[in-house]
Image: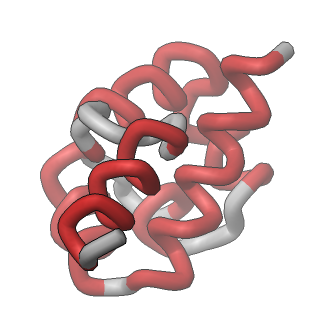
Amino acid sequence: MNDKSNKENFQVNNPLHGIRLIDILEYLVDEYGWEDLGYEININCFTNNPSIKSSLKFLRKTRWARDKVERLYLKTIKE
């Protein structure tokens, strides 16, 4: 297999493939609200004057925080 085939197979098996970060964040805010979301993932963009815009900016720059958000999203949709 070549690199392109490996990448395509990974994306098919990736449950987040095709889901935008803004959609994930809006879903979690609707599901939890900012206060509970800040409790689940204790980062300033969720606990200190939260907004979609500021949270997206932070999550796009900070991989570890985005990973936590994606894990919570996957956990939440499975329940």
Residue plotted at (69% across, 60% down): 41
Going by the image, does 9 lie left or right of 78?
A: left
Q: Position of residue 21 (x, y in %)?
A: 28, 45
Q: Position of residue 63 (x, y in %)?
A: 42, 82
In terms of depth relative to the viewer, which is nearer, 14 or 23? Answer: 14
In terms of depth relative to the viewer, which is nearer, 54 or 49? Answer: 54
Residue plotted at (48% across, 28% down): 29
Q: Is residue 5 above or below residue 43?
A: above
In terms of depth relative to the viewer, which is nearer, 45 or 73? Answer: 73
The outermost residue toward the right is 79
Q: Is residue 42 above or below residue 75?
A: below
Residue plotted at (14% across, 51% down): 53
In terms of depth relative to the viewer, which is nearer, 70 or 47? Answer: 70
Q: Is residue 25 above or below residue 76?
A: below
Based on the displayed image, in which of its 4 quarters is residue 49 positioned?
bottom left
Q: Quadrant of the C terminus?
A: top right
Question: Which colour scheme appears in the figure?
Answer: secondary structure
The outermost residue toward the front is 1
Q: Position of residue 26 (x, y in %)?
A: 35, 27
Q: Quadrant of the N terminus?
A: bottom left
Residue plotted at (46% across, 67% down): 66
